[in-house]
């Protein structure tokens, strides 16, 4: 039975603490589930027309039974886990929240500006270190250690 790698589980939890990933023995796929109040969880029953009409309880190992018992509902199934999981979550959140294209562009621009500021901080730091090293090698500057 495949298991969810710890780093994938932690990324999903970091994205949304109410989500979890586990292996579905019933579907033979990974299942993404969301923690919900008990009254929202699907009861582990289904309607059948075989033999007699009516409702039958699903097996204890079924996804609905496990979800109901533990307070989760299925969000999606994945045949394999890869880098597309988090972008898929992000995209579906955008659709569910009905964010406009303008708002998405604003958020992307803000993210890019923050990323560029972090890159510039790194460049400035490295440039300062290079300048100090060159000045030291030229004998124009002395490294001080210990702060005295």
Image (tube, rainbow, N blue to C red):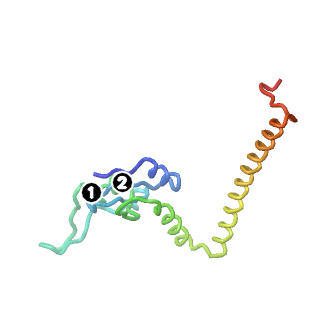
- Which quadrant: the C terminus? top right
Q: Position of residue 14 (x, y in %)?
A: 52, 52
Q: Position of residue 88 (x, y in %)?
A: 48, 66
Which of the numbered marks, if any, corresponds to residue 25? Answer: 1
Which of the numbered marks, if any, corresponds to residue 10? Answer: none
Q: Position of residue 1 (x, y in %)?
A: 27, 51
Extreme residue in the left direction: 51
Q: CA distance from mark 2 to mark 1?
A: 9 Å
Residue at image point 32% right, 53% down:
69
Q: Position of residue 78 (x, y in %)?
A: 37, 63
Mark 2 residue element? strand
Circles 2, 1 touching at the beta carbon (< 8 Å): no
56 horizontally vs 70: left or right: left
Residue assigned mark 2 = 22
**So how many labels did they put on this image?**
2
Residue at image point 33% right, 55% down:
23
Residue at image point 74% right, 46% down:
126
Mark 1 residue element? loop
5 horizontally vs 65: left or right: right
């Amino acid at each position: 039975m495949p298991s969810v790698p710890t780093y994938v589980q932690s990324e999903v939890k970091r994205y949304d603490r109410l989500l979890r990933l586990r292996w579905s023995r019933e579907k033979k796929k990974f299942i993404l589930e969301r923690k919900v109040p008990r009254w929202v969880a699907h009861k582990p029953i289904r309607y059948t027309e075989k033999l007699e009409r009516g409702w039958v309880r699903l097996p204890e190992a079924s996804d609905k039974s496990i979800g109901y018992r533990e307070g989760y509902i299925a969000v999606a199934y994945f045949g394999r886990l890869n880098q597309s999981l988090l972008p898929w979550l992000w995209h579906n959140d955008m659709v569910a929240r009905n964010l406009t294209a303008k708002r998405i562009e604003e958020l992307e621009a803000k993210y890019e500006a923050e990323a560029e500021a972090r890159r510039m901080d790194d460049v400035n730091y490295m440039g300062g270190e290079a300048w100090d090293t060159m000045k030291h090698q030229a004998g124009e500057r002395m490294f001080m250690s210990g702060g005295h």
